[in-house]
Amino acid sequence: MTEEAPRAGRRAPEAVAIVGVGLIGGSFALALRALGFVGKIVGVSSPEAVRVAIERGVIDEALPLGEAAAMADLIYLARPIEGILAVLNELDQYVRPGTLVTDAGSTKSAICARAAEKIQRGRFVGGHPMAGKEARGADFAEASLFHGRPYILTSGCDELERLITGFGARIVRMPAEEHDALDALTSHLPQLISTALAASIGTEPEAARVAGPAAMDLTRLALSPYEIWRDIFATNATNIDQALGVFIGKLEELRGELRSPGIEREFENAAAVARALRAGAR
Amino acid sequence: MTEEAPRAGRRAPEAVAIVGVGLIGGSFALALRALGFVGKIVGVSSPEAVRVAIERGVIDEALPLGEAAAMADLIYLARPIEGILAVLNELDQYVRPGTLVTDAGSTKSAICARAAEKIQRGRFVGGHPMAGKEARGADFAEASLFHGRPYILTSGCDELERLITGFGARIVRMPAEEHDALDALTSHLPQLISTALAASIGTEPEAARVAGPAAMDLTRLALSPYEIWRDIFATNATNIDQALGVFIGKLEELRGELRSPGIEREFENAAAVARALRAGAR
């Protein structure tokens, strides 16, 4: 027998705790299983979420945070942002030294700052999978949710990157501040636009009679429940305000050119960006 | 034999001329066939569009406008708006008295005004099917394109309404001016929003790396070629400017409330509008 070559990075996890077993946390668990993970997956969640998750085979059992954290060598925080911030306040006392802690929060600066302050025994890596769907909860979790989507990590981490690459996601390493500025443009601004468009259409009671595919497409995000957005606005308002400023500026430019041939070039430039987004997503 | 009961309205058409055999004109022809229409369908279009349309069996033959109009008892104008306006200038001299002329132009006021002035022998009814897809041309025409979609008519017309109802579309009778104001909100505004969002995202070269489903959904319209929009802006700029004003006002309201609890109610109201749009579309 030849001696086994030393492996780069740390070992794959043997027990995983998912804190917040909803769509994202549940999908992370299912993606791990699909990747061949045979260790224990423990959930920390509300009684109702736990019931659904166990019924669907998403987690093996549910435990309180302290017990789950003590047995895990990978802890995945998938609550809403304020929930993640609250967990970070108390988590470190429970974890074994060196335990990998990562999260799926929609903004990263506040969470990474809190983790830097509170997580000492564990190793924290901020994360944000750019995936989701309209339906929520572990009922709708699926192993392929991350496939083909960007997955942002705020720092390098071999063993986490192996998992995420295994899910078929595209890893993007990016500092928390840059993530939050870019997501303000690509995610938080679209939400506000959709909400404002629905509100605008709502000013004309007859509009529903003529609404076609364009109105349907652009008001879909307006169906999102506010509770998801409260924490995002609370932790990224400055970037969002700036993104709104850029967008309103572009819209006023178009407004000023409605009857001018110059608007053709604006359309061409915007179409080129839209095509580049799609090329980047491949 | 009992005497045949007198039929309401006029007879179904026996020969149809489609002026502009693209996605919409071609789909109208296919939908007619699917409805059991066995008469002749003549196309008036560019040599390339005619070739595609004949190859796909969308039209039986191609003729110049004058000859096609002279043999048809239903004339369907499916060019871009300026093309429809140009045809209306010369069409009337060719049509037989009483021939039904309708159109599929995206704005209605300019077209209906031109038709009122120019169409004397024919009977004109303005129309706008709220249907479409990203691909263009008779290659992508399909009999089901109008199914489940609103189809606006600017005046009542039994024999046309029988056909459109037969296509599975939902007829909406509405004066041209009201159509144009509502479409500015539900169709033209979404296009400008999508173009402005793509332009905003284009200000950050790294944004494509993190763009998720929201950015993709809301920049899809930005891929639309400008040539479709030139005529819409030229014929509906006042309404579009007003819709932009309403929308920017709503967006500024949200911007001012990013950190305020009041934004929750804005989200709830907008979600209710988005749900009502979907209920209306059923």
Image (cartoon, coloured by chain):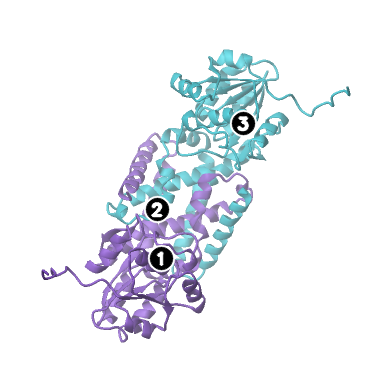
Chain colours: A purple, B cyan
Q: Are marks 1 and 3 in contact (CB under 8 Å)?
A: no
Amino acid at circle 1: Ser
Q: Secondary structure at mark 1?
A: helix
Q: Residue at x 43, y 62 (%)?
A: A142
Q: Secondary structure at mark 3?
A: helix
Q: Residue furthest bottom?
A: A93
Q: Residue furthest right?
A: B2
Marks 2 and 3, Cα distance to the nearest angstrom?
A: 38 Å
| Residue sitting nearer the eye, A124 or B222 | A124
Badge 3 is on which residue?
A: B34
Marks 1 and 3, Cα distance to the nearest angstrom?
A: 44 Å
Protein chain holding label 3:
B
Residue B250 visible here: no
Badge 2 is on which residue?
A: B215
**Residue A226, above or below B236:** below
Protein chain holding label 2:
B
Amino acid at circle 3: Ala
Q: Secondary structure at mark 2?
A: helix
Q: Circle 2: is it few (<14), some (14-19), or many (20+) Cα within 10 Å?
A: many
Where is residue A198? Give x, y as percent.
53, 54
Badge 1 is on which residue?
A: A27
